[in-house]
Amino acid sequence: MQEKKDRTVAENRKAYHEYFIEERMEAGIELSGTEVKSIRAGKVTLGESYAAVVDGELWLIGCHVSPYEQGNRFNREPTRTRRLLMHKSEIARLYGLVKQKGLTLVPTKMYFRAGMVKVEVGVGRGKKLHDKRDAEAERQAGRDIDRRLKGQREE
């Protein structure tokens, strides 16, 4: 039997720029039917979103899901707060990590697995300005090396 790959719908690249992602966990998400159709069409943005534990439940805040064109009155507000679905023990563990200084919950990716929408939530530690500069310098050095190696192969 063939194993289907996950289909990534949205990635939060800004999260990797702003945070050191120390740990990742998968969560389900509670959606309406028109939201699922809109996400399937790729009309979702994770850029300004974050996750928070409130009253023992995990919530996704600030995620923008565009209204479905044929959804009429069934459409929901695009930036409404959505519940993330995880086991209670996992949520309690995440809550304990967030209580530590400087840690936050950031959605890093949204994808389909077996027809269900899943959100990858990362536990992130905020980067300082010099950390961001170091990461950019490393990326640039890697690009320069690749460029030189490619030039040598072609000669």
Image: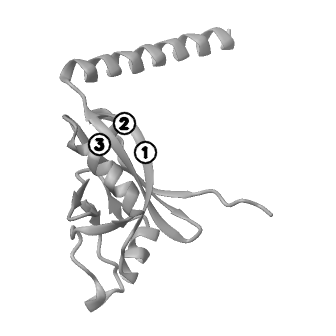
At x 30% / y 88%, what residue is drawn? 74
Decide: is 107 above or below 65: above
First in residue order: circle 3 vs circle 2: 2
At x 43% / y 45%, what residue is drawn? 24
Residue 2 position, x and y percent, is 77, 61
For residue 19, what is the image quadrant?
top left
Q: Is residue 16 left or right of residue 99?
A: right
- Do the CB atoms of the residues marked 2 and 1 lie less than 8 Å apart? yes
Residue 68 position, x and y percent, is 34, 78
Q: Which residue is mark 1?
A: 24
At x 25% / y 44%, what residue is drawn? 98
From mark 2 to mark 1, how far is it between C-alphas? 7 Å
Residue 151 position, x and y percent, is 59, 12
- The quadrant the N terminus occupies is bottom right
At x 36% / y 42%, what residue is drawn? 13
Amino acid at the residue labelled 2: Ile
Amino acid at the residue labelled 3: Leu
Q: Which residue is mark 3?
A: 97
Residue 59 position, x and y percent, is 26, 63
From mark 3 to mark 2, how far is it between C-alphas? 13 Å
Q: Nearer the viewer, residue 124 or 35?
A: 124
From mark 1 to mark 3, how far is it between C-alphas? 12 Å
Numbered mark located on residue 21 in the image:
2
Decide: is 101 above or below 134: below
